[in-house]
Amino acid sequence: MKLISPCYGYHMITKNDKSLGKKIKHYRKVRDLTQEELAEKVRVTPKYIQYLESAKRIPSIKLIYKIAKNLEIKVKDLFTF
């Protein structure tokens, strides 16, 4: 597992984090959006979207909400329960 350093300490990248990135990528492609277009809509850089989709970064809850809203899905659609 890789460690990243968000604002508050370290977090281990888990299987669920990788699943989140895959789902963001899947729904982005379903909506026929590029990483650049999604990034613009949620006000982050395209590189950050790339990091999310490859599970190199973990988005904040606020960003997850923005992504879901712009992909026209429910937040729960991004998670596996």
Image: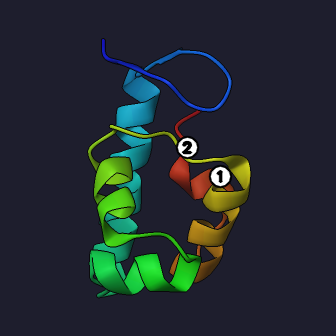
Q: Are marks 1 and 2 in contact (CB under 8 Å)?
A: yes
Label 2 SS: loop
Q: Quadrant of residue 64?
A: bottom right
Say if 61 sits above or below 63 in the image.
above
Q: In percent of the image, x 45 and y 29: which residue is there?
A: 16
Image position, residue 54 (x, y; %): 26, 45
Quadrant assignment for the C terminus:
top right
Q: CA distance from mark 1 to mark 2?
A: 5 Å
Image position, residue 59 (x, y; %): 56, 47
Q: Where is mark 2, residue-wise?
A: 79
Q: Is residue 25 left or right of residue 39?
A: left
Say if 26 sits above or below 58 in the image.
below
Say if 70 sits above or below 52 in the image.
below
Numbered label attached to residue 76: 1
The reply to whether residue 52 is in sight is: yes
Q: In percent of the image, x 41 and y 59: which residue is there?
A: 24
Q: Is residue 4 left or right of residue 81?
A: left
58 or 76: nearer the viewer: 58
Q: Is residue 40 left or right of residue 68?
A: left
Question: As shown in the figure, which amino acid type bears the numbered disc 2?
Answer: Phe
